[in-house]
Amino acid sequence: MKIPVIDIFAGPGGLGEGFSSVPSKNRRKFDIRLSIEKDRIAAETLELRSFYRKFSPKRVPPEYYTMMMEADLERRSQLRKELFEKYPRQAAAAKKDAWCTTLGETSSKTVDERINKALKNEKNWVLIGGPPCQAYSLVGRSRRQWKENLDKSDIRVHLYKEYLRIIAAHSPAVFVMENVKGLLSSKVDGKKIFQMIKQDLQDPSIVFKDSKFRYKIYSLTSKPIDFENGYPVYEKDMDYLIKSEDYGVPQRRHRVILLGIREDIKVDPDILTPVGEGEMVNLEKVIGDLPKIRSGINRSFVRSEQITSNNKLKKKRYYKKEKDSDKTWQELINSFRNEIISWNGFAKNYSRQKISPPNHGIGSEFVAHETPGPDNPLHDWYKDPNLKGVTNHESRSHLVQDLKRYMFSSMFATTYERFPRLHEFEKHATELLPDHENAKSGKFADRFRVQLPDEPATTVTSHISKDGHYFIHYDPDQCRSLTVREAARIQTFPDNYLFCGSRTAQYHQVGNAVPPFLSKQIALIVLDLFKKMSKS
């Protein structure tokens, strides 16, 4: 029997993917019955993945891969339409599973109807997901006011309240709630938000009087030091923090994840098993076997001047459009490289041999390539033998001056095994400093950050959709920021997980996700709970 799962605030489906990846005799042990997400493009990604899951891994139709391996987005969209028309039953089920709506705005009645329809009277099921971090900023306000003086315009209150309401109204056997590390230290009016949230989750009737059950809130990394009236007690709030790199994820992503178990279930969970010392997965091991591509070029900075706008001084910048070609790129990159080699400290690591543009140019929505390689520690996790390359692997176009900063940053990291701070940019060449008001303030000292090859990456966030300065590739010969697929590898999405929409939308989705490889380990703990429940 498959265990039903409802995924709310689903993003592109990272948590759900981990649960869906737990096998049982060639079937999936968990069944994602409903994924709720407000972003239309992320919901398209969820729908496509739900369609994929309607087939056993060995019976995914060849047309699915034909669609994935189409580099032209318009043509891919048409192939998706044809795919859904050829398999109407699976397509209809996928459309039902992925619901694009905004929790907190959609009526409770409508949400409850969709959840009840998906659950089909199942009493023991799993709720996964968590409200966006902004939802907690107002939790400290008197919860008694929620029913009376609620600020209807503040969606953040609605998000947190709706999450709690779903638990209160539908009583999942287990819930898994993820949120940012800052939740542990945030305060409102001197009170810790985390303690209030834990109290609400333990006893939803504090807010919703009709709630039938209380919940035991467990850490996934530490055993309780004690129990009070059957409820686990932990030494410190940090016990609820999961450091992803300790569990085989190639990323220093630190998140609060709570495991809630309904009070009538008299079993205790296991905890995650960390990787051994020296077994952390570094960045180069998971993205080093992807096709090499170059950066794109869009424009160059010419000059800036102060102008008055609305009685305020403002800086106006002037740019020149640049032609993007292999030839232009090669000339620029080699001139930057030779100049940097001439600076003190760099010559010992580099010859003056010219860099040539990679065969795959700036990449594409699909690049044919044999990957992942056999030495990739997550080879079996990423690999789909039916996919003859990688999707979502196209570089951004960059400002010419930024490419010089990227080249300097990656060469500096190769030389000194750390990324340079902004004052070190200025120390080597003043033109490396960006034309930015805060460039010398120290406020953005790590504005340009190389991801080091021999360490787990830093946290991939939705900010990667805005610019790539914080996610510079370590290889100077590619001189670029990370692609969507590289970010997806860091987040441990399988290579056959296709992100829909524009490149900006793809980056945003990847940055908003829970790493599926970590999620699968959590799902195995939940599965063990259900096995114990069936025996007790």
Image (cartoon, rainbow, N blue to C red):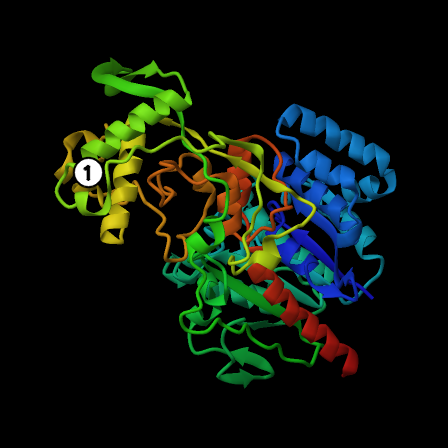
Image coords of residue 230 (percent x, y): 60, 83
Mark 1 crowdedness (10 Å alpha carbons): few <14, some 14-19, many ≥20: some
Q: Nearer the viewer, residue 471 or 292?
A: 292
Q: Is residue 412 visible?
A: yes
What is the tally of numbered marks visible in this picture?
A: 1
Extreme residue toward the right, this view:
89
Query: Who's the residue at 18% across and 47% down the image?
Result: 348
**In this rendering, position of residue 41 left or right of residue 64:** left
Quarter of the figure with residue 228: bottom right
Q: Nearer the viewer, residue 60 or 293?
A: 293
The amino acid at mark 1 is: Ile
Quarter of the figure with residue 505: top right
Relative height, residue 188 to residue 402 (above, below): below
Query: Who's the residue at 36% across and 25% down the image?
Result: 329
Q: Residue at label 1?
A: 341
**In this rendering, position of residue 68 left or right of residue 335:** right
**In this rendering, position of residue 81 left or right of residue 403:** right
Query: Who's the residue at 63% across and 79% down the image?
Result: 268
Quarter of the figure with residue 327: top left
Query: Who's the residue at 68% across and 41% down the image?
Result: 106
Image coords of residue 64 (percent x, y): 74, 39
For the N terminus, the image quarter is bottom right
Image coords of residue 10 (percent x, y): 62, 48
Q: Is residue 400 visible?
A: no
Image coords of residue 250 (percent x, y): 46, 57
Relative height, residue 161 to residue 364 (above, below): below
Q: Nearer the viewer, residue 238 or 413?
A: 413
